[in-house]
Amino acid sequence: MMIESWNDNVSYNQYYAQCAPKHCSYFITSRNNALYVFTTMIGLFGGLSVALKILVPLIVGWIRNKMRVRTETINVTNSFTCYERVHALWRWIKKKIFELNLFESDASWDDHHRRQYEIISTRIYLLLLTFAIGIIIVYTIAIDQTQTIIVKNPSQRRFEKLVSNPGNLPTLDCPCQNIHIPYESFMSISPHYHQLCSSDFVVENCSWINFVHYRSSPVNYSHEDYRLFVLPHFRLLCHLCALANDALVEALRIFHSNKLITKRAQSRQVVEAQVESVINQFRLSTPQTFIRMLDFIRQMAQGNGLVSSISSNWFVLPTYITTTVIAMRSRSYGVNNCSCGTNSMCVSSATIDTWRVPGFLVGCSPLESLLQSTLECLYDVSCINRLKMPNQYSNITIRPLKYTLSSPNVTVQSLVNLLMVDRWEQRSITYEQYYASCAPSICYYVPTERANPIYLITTIIGVYGGLTVALQIIVPVVVKTGQYLAMCRRQRIEPMAAAITDQ
């Protein structure tokens, strides 16, 4: 390749700029700090106190009822109306609300001012508690609840179920244990060649070459007579099929040894799309490599003036024209007398005597003329028989090409551009083998959903406990401070009012 050395220059900064990650996530293992432990203990204490305040009286009452001696009760009927009962119940409830005292103590039974102080503290406490719980309820309902869920050793079925949920896709991550997966482990492709490459015209040790071998004939044909080109043409067809097969076998070997680099497990659709893209690239690049090499050979032959084996491009001038040196002259083809000295693509219609051979052309070289020809004649039995050398008898039947398998109007150049491949036989991608090769040991994702009722209730109970403890400490202090400030202000105002009255 005329290369002395390779200069590698890998820029990680440019790679990272092209990667452009939106976020990074990681897990750390650490012990809880003192603040977290303290706040958690307060929350648990408050939640347990609420639960026990509700449960303990019920349990104690149930036990006492079981232990109490049953006594006969006498049903006393009264003459109160329904309205009077409701009105009496409302007055009782109203009284309980106005006299509700959550900070009641023994000292407040005989101290009216202290009792008022405790009732005011209760009202402020309930107001702040209701306000805070209301805010927490609205906030809990409004925000999305997130929780990292970890699935260890996920099966393929579980992974596909996770992928099928659109809500999991943005955060789903299942790292592969093997990030390099060979293509041959889960997929393969194989070419189906043009029917010519498996026909009686190009198979090894066939009799067709003997049928068209005119070179042993003593007759000197014209340079445009197809009997000079027929043998090189079919030998070239045989070589083109063989070279195309060798090129594809080597290319497929390299392709199957390549690896799919995937850091995390991908869904079936993504894997199929990636593999399909790689296969399409392979189908395009492999023929182009073969064509470049063939074009190089063609250009070298034309540029160096190489004489073909049948002297179809250059011929030696007779000795009566020049006697001192051997002189060469280029041949011309076509109605415009295209010269092979300047253009290797010059061609004319192939003829045998006065019969024009369908599809085939003659020109400056057997290869150039063959590439511009079509295989129309090889689809017709009568045309095939006329290509045979006269007086050649055999019981071997040469089967023509089938119209149902390929078109007769396609040039050989078009077939070579596709490496003589009629279609590609692609075996279905085995996603199960891909997943087994990836073998993710863990999957984690963060689903986003609204808070459920259980989460809402437990959150309120936990917060209620912490708020209860905090407010029971803060509210009495605030109320007492407020009363003290009010009393001080009143003491300053009363002397001033008395002085003004005396004046």
Image (cartoon, rainbow, N blue to C red):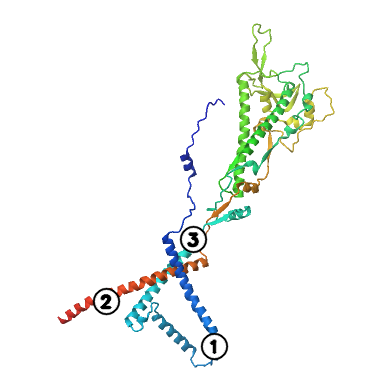
Q: Residue 487 carries which label?
A: 2
Measured Cα–Cα span from mark 2 to mark 3: 49 Å
The reply, left or right, for residue 111 in relation to residue 327 is: left
> 463 or 165: which is nearer to us?
463
- Tell me the kind of residue under disc 3: Asp
> 368 or 69: which is nearer to us?
69
Across the whole image, how many numbered discs are drawn on residues? 3
The quadrant in which the C terminus is found is bottom left
Residue placed under numbered mark 3 in the picture? 144
- Which mark is in front, 2 or 3? 2
The answer to whether any part of residue 141 appears in the image is: yes
Q: Do the residues labelled 2 and 1 touch (CB within 8 Å)?
A: no
Between discs 2 and 3, the one toward the N terminus: 3
Between discs 2 and 1, the one toward the N terminus: 1
- Does dot 2 land on a helix, a strand or a loop? helix
- Tell me the kind of residue under disc 2: Met
Between discs 1 and 3, the one toward the N terminus: 1
Mark 1 neighbour class, 10 Å CA radius: few under 14, some 14 to 19, many 20 or more: few
| Quarter occupied by residue 289 | top right
Horizontal and vertical percent for residue 349?
70, 24
**Residue occupying the point 65% across, 13% down:** 328
Name above or below for residue 384 compared with residue 56: above
Residue placed under numbered mark 1 in the picture? 69
Name above or below for residue 290 compared with residue 497: above
> 137 or 304: which is nearer to us?
137
- Tell me the kind of residue under disc 1: Val
**Residue occupying the point 69% across, 17% down:** 311
